[in-house]
Image (spheres, grey):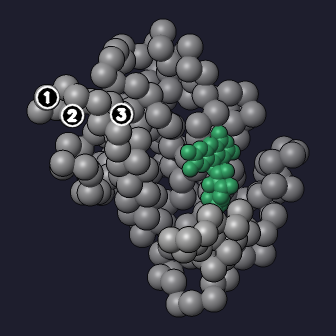
Amino acid sequence: MSKVAETEFPVHELIKSRWSPRAYTDEPITQDELYTILEAGTWAPSSMNDQPWRFSWALKSNKEAFDTHMDALLQGNKAWAKHASAIVLIAARNTFKANNVKNPSAKHDIGMATQNMLLQAQALDIYCHVIAGYDREYVDSTFALESPFEPVTFVVFGRLGDPALLEEPFASRELQARERMSFQELSFTPNHNPKV
Ligand SMILES: Cc1cc2nc3c(=O)[nH]c(=O)nc-3n(C[C@H](O)[C@H](O)[C@H](O)COP(=O)(O)O)c2cc1C
């Protein structure tokens, strides 16, 4: 079963082949690979080039740091994410550095950086899964993040594993087809609301 997107138009292979697995092998990813992915994130565009993304990361080889990050995930995510080889917490600076005024684009720009990281990882044959299901109170009490910084998402990274090794319901989910609404369905005009 292929999880590669079936597209109407010739979308780039890197975009089509990225998906969010839950099954990972034990094969480690290297520090250089993780640093390449993080640097790719920093080359995203951002409002005023403010670069509001901040990263806290751990490779599995650093057990203490890895567990500190992993323990933030809700049980339904931790159950499979623990097999990944690296984990990153992406935080936002929600004010501009220059004047400390609220940056309404901060989380938008975090998304830009995150997708850069996902595609860079895909180019290295490393798979990723973005995770917003985490315990915010745990993060607030464990990480020394204070205003204007706030946690946004975790991302786990690893080599693609065998879905058969997953427990249910994750094994079945891993085999489900990937679906998207078409861009035509998502389109709108100046005079009409989007249809959905
Ligand atoms: C901001 C964000 C938060 C997400 N949080 C979770 C999560 O907590 N648990 C999970 O299993 N997947 C999570 N996902 C993964 C999405 O469910 C997944 O990207 C989506 O179903 C599309 O699948 P695909 O990435 O394989 O194309 C998250 C994705 C994003 C972008």
* Location of residue 74 with respect to 60 vertically, above or below: above
Disc 2 on helix, strand or loop? loop
* Location of residue 137 with respect to 121 vertically, above or below: above
x 16%, y 32%: residue: 97
Location of mark 2 (residue): 96
Image coords of residue 151 (percent x, y): 44, 28
* Residue that protrudes farthest toward the left in the picture: 98
Disc 1 on helix, strand or loop? loop
Q: Is residue 119 visible?
A: yes
Q: Is residue 34 visible?
A: no
Label disc, if present, on residue 92 of the rendered structure: 3
Image coords of residue 144 (percent x, y): 36, 14
Amino acid type, label 2: Phe
Image coords of residue 12 (percent x, y): 47, 82
Q: Quadrant of residue 174?
A: bottom right
Q: Are marks 2 and 1 in contact (CB under 8 Å)?
A: yes
Q: Nearer the viewer, residue 26 or 50?
A: 50
Amino acid type, label 1: Asn
The image quadrant where one finds the C terminus is bottom right
Location of mark 1 (residue): 99
Disc 3 on helix, strand or loop? strand
CA gap, disc 2 to disc 3? Answer: 11 Å
